[in-house]
Amino acid sequence: MEVTISLIKGDRIYHQLEKMGSSLDWDRTCFTMDPALQDAVKEAFVRMHEEGVIYRSNRLVNWSCTLKSAISDIEVEKKELTGRTELPVPGYVEKVEFGVLVHFAYQVEDSEDRVVVATTRIETMLGDTAVAVNPKDERWRTSERFLYISEYYT
């Protein structure tokens, strides 16, 4: 059986509903992003957006690398960290390190230049395909390979 987001999250939600005394037709449960429902869900969201009931915005989201999905604020345990901290994370055997800013450099192709990047999630660099630089940053004003960025990011 393939483990899907609907099984991981839905199962928890269904158990919560059962504990609250809900009497539902559990054989007909489905997840909003199941293939059979995707078109209807998209249509509903488009209609609600056009009616002004929901809106689209650029915001930070809580992303779960394990679930490969955004999760709601109520599913996130927020902790203030003052520095390097190792915490247990569901799905990981070892504790995971948080609160560390890692610097690394990308080599600029056909150049001696390097672009230094800082991140708290070093593992995400494996998926990087490009790096955007500030076109007003003097370090990159003379670099031909970055001139195109100023057209789009001014």
Image (cartoon, grey):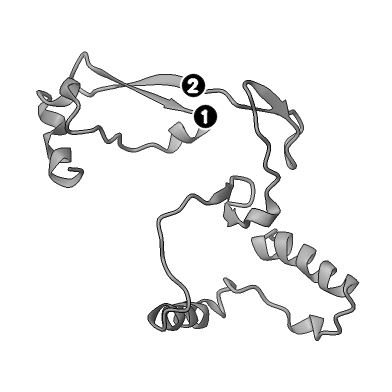
Image spot of residue 53 (x, y percent): 47, 79
Residue 38 horizontal side relative to residue 89, left or right: left
Q: Check if mark 1's residue and mark 2's residue have beta carbons within 8 Å.
A: yes
Residue 144 horizontal side relative to residue 77, left or right: left
Q: The C terminus is located in which quarter?
A: top left
Question: Which residue sits at x=14%, y=30%?
Answer: 145
Question: Which residue sits at x=56%, y=23%?
Answer: 100
Image spot of residue 66 (x, y percent): 64, 46
Residue 59 horizontal side relative to residue 7, left or right: left
Q: Which mark is residue 120?
A: 1
Q: Is residue 77 above or below residue 125?
A: below
Image spot of residue 113 (x, y percent): 22, 16
Residue where numbered disc 2 is placed: 102
Q: Is residue 117 above or below residue 49?
A: above
Count of numbered badges drawn on the protein: 2
Question: Which residue sits at x=57%, y=71%?
Answer: 33
Query: Could you tell me which secondary element the residue under label 1 belongs to?
Result: loop
Badge 1: residue crowd in 10 Å (few <14, some 14–19, many ≥20): few
Badge 2: residue crowd in 10 Å (few <14, some 14–19, many ≥20): few
Question: Mark 1: which amino acid?
Answer: Thr
Disc nearer the start of the sequence (1/2): 2
